[in-house]
Amino acid sequence: MQLAPNFPDAPTMHQLMQLLHEEIGLPERKTIHLTTSINVDLACNGADAQHLIETLEEQFAIDFVDYDSYRYFQPEGYDVYLKRKAKGRGDKEPLTIGMLYRAIKAQRWDTQELEGL
């Protein structure tokens, strides 16, 4: 795994990267940036995504009260028909490593703040 030159060199970031490597795997030859999206760039979805978020909550004590998994991830057993029925649930927002890192530091998920809305 190659990290971008401006990647934070902090114990919390090392823990996050280790967790991501164990849970979803990180590409060996692709440079990882804070803007690398775990759902789009690393193709984490469904049960893997749910397990990752649960593990983040346990290991880092993040309060995910404002978190909406459908905003970022396709559900397990993705069905195109259901996608069309769910208004506003079609396109997925990128969930980046930087967003996870900021949520860990704040110990809470604030969608507007983390997405810069």
Image (cartoon, helix red, strand yellow):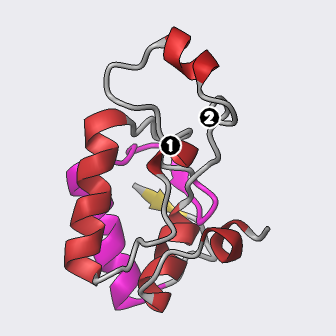
**Residue 19 sits inside the magenta stretch:** yes
Any part of residue 9 in sight: yes
Residue 110 drawn at (x, y percent): 58, 76
The residue type indicated by label 2 comes to: Arg
39 vs 113, nearest the viewer = 113
- The residue depicted at 39 percent of the width and 36 percent of the height is 45
Left or right: where does residue 24 sit relative to residue 39?
left
The residue type indicated by label 1 comes to: Tyr
SS type, badge 1 = helix
16 vs 112, nearest the viewer = 112
- Residue 89: which numbered mark, if any? 2
SS type, badge 2 = loop
How far apart in space, not on screen, are marks 2 and 1 (Cα)? 7 Å
- Is mark 2 in CB contact (under 8 Å) with mark 1? yes
Left or right: where does residue 55 sit relative to residue 97?
left
Residue 7 drawn at (x, y percent): 56, 75
- Residue 16: which numbered mark, if any? none
- The residue depicted at 28 percent of the width and 83 percent of the height is 61
- The residue depicted at 47 percent of the width and 40 percent of the height is 73
Within 10 Å of disc 2 (Cα), the crowding (few <14, some 14-19, many 20+) is some
Q: Nearer the N terminus, badge 2 or badge 1?
A: 1
Residue 95 lies in what quarter of the image? Answer: bottom right
The residue lying furthest to the right in this view is: 117
Residue 60 drawn at (x, y percent): 28, 81
Query: Quick one: quadrant of the C terminus?
Result: bottom right
Q: What stretch of residues is rendered in magenta?
A: 9-36
Left or right: where does residue 19 sit relative to residue 28?
left
Query: To which residue does mark 1 refer?
Result: 70
Query: Quick one: quadrant of the N terminus?
Result: bottom left
